[in-house]
């Protein structure tokens, strides 16, 4: 009888530890999913900015290179880096 009670107690403790472990894993997965979504959003923004930069360079080549376009080409990488750091 005493062995049976110890077995039940051991199973009960193991089950509680498993439940706590599962809750911690679920919490960490939720955090990771949020981070993945944020990275996906930043990646989409970066792709948009790179596309925008490509269009500016195309216009620059068509127009023969204006000072404004050169200025934008110099400033755009700074804007991209700032957006990535602030988001």
Image (cartoon, rainbow, N blue to C red):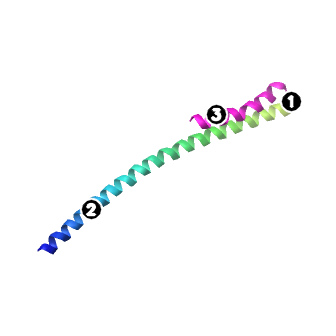
Q: Which residue lies under the disc numbered 1?
A: 65
Please say whether residue 67 is one of the residues in the magenta stretch.
Answer: yes
Please say whether residue 65 is one of the residues in the magenta stretch.
Answer: yes
Which label lies toward us, 3 or 1? 3
Residue 65 lies, in percent from the top left, at 86, 29
Q: Write the residue at 64% across / 33% down.
A: 82
**Does residue 39 appear to the left or right of 26 in the view shown?**
right
Mark 2 to mark 1 CA distance (whole Å): 70 Å
Which label lies toward us, 2 or 1? 2
**Does residue 82 appear to the left or right of 71 in the view shown?**
left
Q: Earlier in the sequence, mark 2 or mark 1?
A: 2
Residue 35 lies, in percent from the top left, at 51, 45
Q: Quadrant of the C terminus?
A: top right
Residues at badges 3 and 1 in contact (C-beta under 8 Å)?
A: no
The label on residue 82 is 3
Q: Secondary structure at mark 2?
A: helix
Q: Secondary structure at mark 1?
A: loop
Q: Write the residue at 24% across / 62% down.
A: 13
Q: Which residue lies under the disc numbered 2?
A: 15
Q: Magenta part of the protein: which range?
A: 64-87
Relative to 38, does residue 71 appear above or below in the rendering?
above
The label on residue 21 is none
Q: Write the residue at 39% across / 52% down.
A: 26
Q: Earlier in the sequence, mark 3 or mark 1?
A: 1
Mark 3 to mark 1 CA distance (whole Å): 26 Å
Q: Write the residue at 15% across / 73% down.
A: 4
Residues at badges 2 and 1 in contact (C-beta under 8 Å)?
A: no
């Amino acid at each position: 009888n005493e062995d049976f009670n110890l077995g039940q107690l051991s199973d009960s403790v193991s089950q509680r530890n498993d439940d706590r472990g599962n809750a911690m894993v679920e919490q960490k997965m939720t955090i990771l999913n949020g981070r993945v979504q944020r990275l996906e959003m930043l990646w989409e923004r970066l792709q948009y900015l790179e596309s925008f930069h490509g269009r500016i360079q195309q216009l620059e080549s068509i127009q023969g290179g204006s000072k404004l376009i050169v200025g934008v080409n110099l400033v755009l990488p700074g804007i991209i880096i700032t957006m990535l750091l602030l988001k």
